[in-house]
Image (spheres, rainbow, N blue to C red):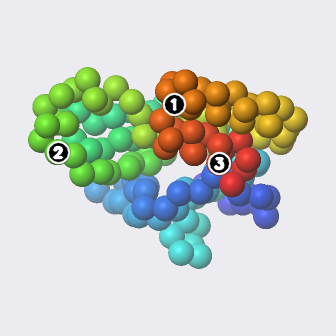
Amino acid sequence: MQLTMTNEQILKKEGGLTYWSGLFIAKRGDLVLTKKDLSFQIKEKQLFCISLKDIISVNCKKGIGTGNENMFIFYKLDGKEKRIKIQHSSLMSLATIGNLSRLSGSYFASWEQAINDARSGRWGNNEGSLDDLEKLAELKKKGVLTEEEFSAKKKQLLGI
């Protein structure tokens, strides 16, 4: 895999995720997004680093009846299409498992958006961030966004 990680500002980072590198080979670590790269790290070791320009698409799927959610990243390397699987696992109650309507949201939706924003260069443009933040605050005030959703989007807009 490409090892192109730069010292760019980190746009998004999250620990406790699982990278599946084979059928039964899983490693837990940090997913890191910069303006140029997406990488997965365990402590100081980098398991993969992909240039954003090589990413073809990002697809998020929720496991049925489980607390697992998957994000598949499709990219090109040496002219061949490759796939990476990142998984988030959470404990779910039996009530949640029984109610499939609660499974409609995606844990990785914010990652998918962040990767696509970084790929299109929208992260670098902070113009309008204040306007966007004010719009988000208004949506929160109206009850459209929860405090958690507001905080996550606010961090994303501010690049925290």
Position of 106 with respect to 46 (left or right) is: left
Give the residue at mark 1. Answer: 145
Asked if one can make out residue 132 in the rendered structure from this viewpoint, the answer is: yes
Q: Farthest residue in the bottom direction?
A: 44
Q: How many marks?
A: 3
Q: Farthest residue in the front direction?
A: 141
**Amino acid residing under circle 2:** Ser
Q: Which quadrant of the figure has residue 113?
A: top right
**Residue 60 sits above or below residue 36 on the image:** above
Give the label, 2 or 1, closer to the camera. 1
The numbered mark, 3 or 2, whose residue comes first in the sequence reads: 2
Give the residue at mark 2. Answer: 93
**Residue 46 sits above or below residue 90 on the image:** below
Position of 12 with respect to 15 (left or right) is: right
Q: CA distance from mark 1 to mark 3?
A: 14 Å
**Residue 35 sits above or below residue 142 on the image:** below
Q: Disc 1 on helix, strand or loop?
A: loop
Q: For this rendering, which residue is in front, 64 or 137?
A: 137
Residue at left offset 77%, top offset 58%:
9
**Which numbered disc covers residue 6?**
none
**Amino acid residing under circle 3:** Lys
Residue at left offset 84%, top offset 40%:
126
Give the residue at mark 3. Answer: 155
The spot of residue 7 in percent (x, y) is 79, 64
The spot of residue 133 in percent (x, y) is 72, 36
